[in-house]
Image: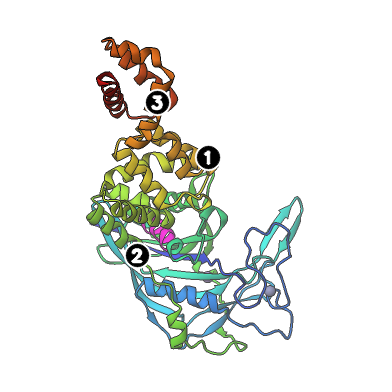
Amino acid sequence: MKNLIPKIGLEIHVELCTTTKLFCDCPNNPDETHPNTNICEICTGQPGVLPVPNKQAVIYILSLANAFKMKINNPSIFARKHYFYPDLPKNYQISQYELPIAFEGIFEIYRKNFSKTIRIRRIHLEEDAGRLIHLGDKSLVDFNRAGVPLIEIVTEPDFRSSEEVIYFAEDLITLVRHLGISKANPEKGEIRFEANISLGIDDNLGTKVEIKNLNSLRALEESTLYEIERQKQIILSGEEVIQETRGWDENKKRTFSQRYKEEAEDYRYFPEPDIPPLFIDEGLKKEIIEIELPSERKKRFEREFNLEFSEAHIIVKDKILADFFENTISELKSMGSNNIKLLKNFLINDILGLLNKFNKNLSDLDFKPQHFAKLAKAFEDNLISSKIFKDILSKIIKDNADADNLLKENQKIVAEPEILNYVNEAIKNNQQAVQDFVAGKKSALEFIVGYVMKLTKGKADIEITRKLIEQKLNELKEK
Ligand code: ZN
Ligand code: MN
């Protein structure tokens, strides 16, 4: 057998973090724990109601289309997709079929020594279903999620390995978070994956198998790896792969048959008669969220700030962190320093670790780029030790302590007028030592230096202190 190559395509559902649902004014609140609270006549499909598309959801999907460099259907059409399931109150889902909002786009996976552009076939808007809760022999339904906006993303079968699939999934999560259109936590069902896999010789596709309901990146990785191997064994043994839908058994770590092609569902799609064609006007286009793509930002961080790929990757993963880093660099530059390496090391090695340790987010803290820059500058100027820097960071992140106060309390005193005040006090309070020095006893100087260090809790710069005391004592001696 020559060149049996996997061809994998993905279908992804991304839950949008809009304020309200897709076709009604019910709150879109994934954290609502009380069932059937955020529901109304529209999202529970009562007769005689009229769904009205949510403008914010339309702006969100246009923003993703823009990031994918897609073509826009103007107008696009909402369609009814019929199927029967207890969590679907209308017995149909309002989705898009023939004319999705956007089609033909691209998205670049960018990794260390690896880059690949994946073609995006289409993206469309549709509503989510409710949730079933199984309690013993009873099943209950919660419609809080019914009508929540989803974007369905369909890629071309451009992935050649499970690894590429995971890179794409991770980079997509980063993208939608940077756009601010979805929280995209796989474990909360805010992003869900399905994979189409076939093995064909060279460019041929082969028979396609669909794996449904992959609700974690790990399930996506393990199921695609398993399925590639399963199909390979079938083909190598001279048999044929059956076109079917398979599920993923998390415990047995294998895919299993769910539905054959002959049993494929007919969704009886037709245009939604209650929603007019969706036109995108110029006003709406102005509201599109435009960002520097995370892949571009990583490349720029590597280039401009001399970061390793792994460093750029970890910083850019979180938009708040990336903005924080970049703004700190500007602050530091305005103080006349360009020690990016220092910032990078404290950020990656200390701040990230402390945030993790104390379970905090940067956005919860009053710690701002100017604070971080001031601390870094103080360290660079030898006003604080690295131990003190780390202690200060720890207090800031643990207790949201005031960075400026901590710096003031901990940094060395180098200003001569300030040290001189302490020196005068020390001389006034140690007349015996002064007389000893005047009498020629040099060691009396160190006694007074020690006294100043005690007064300032060790913060006065010792060289400056000694110099000032010596000057003072010599003046007294000459008198
Ligand atoms: Zn509603
Ligand atoms: Mn769908």
**Disc 3 target residue:** 458
Residue 167: within the magenta? yes
Whether disc 3's CB lies below 8 Å from ligand 1 is answered: no
At a point 57% along the width and 55% down the height, the residue shown is: 188
Amino acid on which disc 1 is placed: Lys
Q: Which of 180 and 107 is in front in this view?
A: 180
Mark number for residue 237? none
Mark number for residue 293? 2
- Of marks 3 and 2, which one's residue comes earlier in the chain? 2
- Of marks 1 and 2, which one's residue comes earlier in the chain? 2
**Relative to residue 288, is residue 422 depicted above or below?**
above
Answer yes or no: is residue 463 visible: yes
**Relative to residue 293, is residue 450 depicted above or below?**
above
Q: Position of residue 390 (x, y in %)?
A: 41, 35
Closer to the camera: disc 1 or disc 2? 1
Residue 210: within the magenta? no
Q: Give the range drawn in magenta.
A: 166-175
Q: How far apart are marks 1 and 2 (CA)?
A: 32 Å
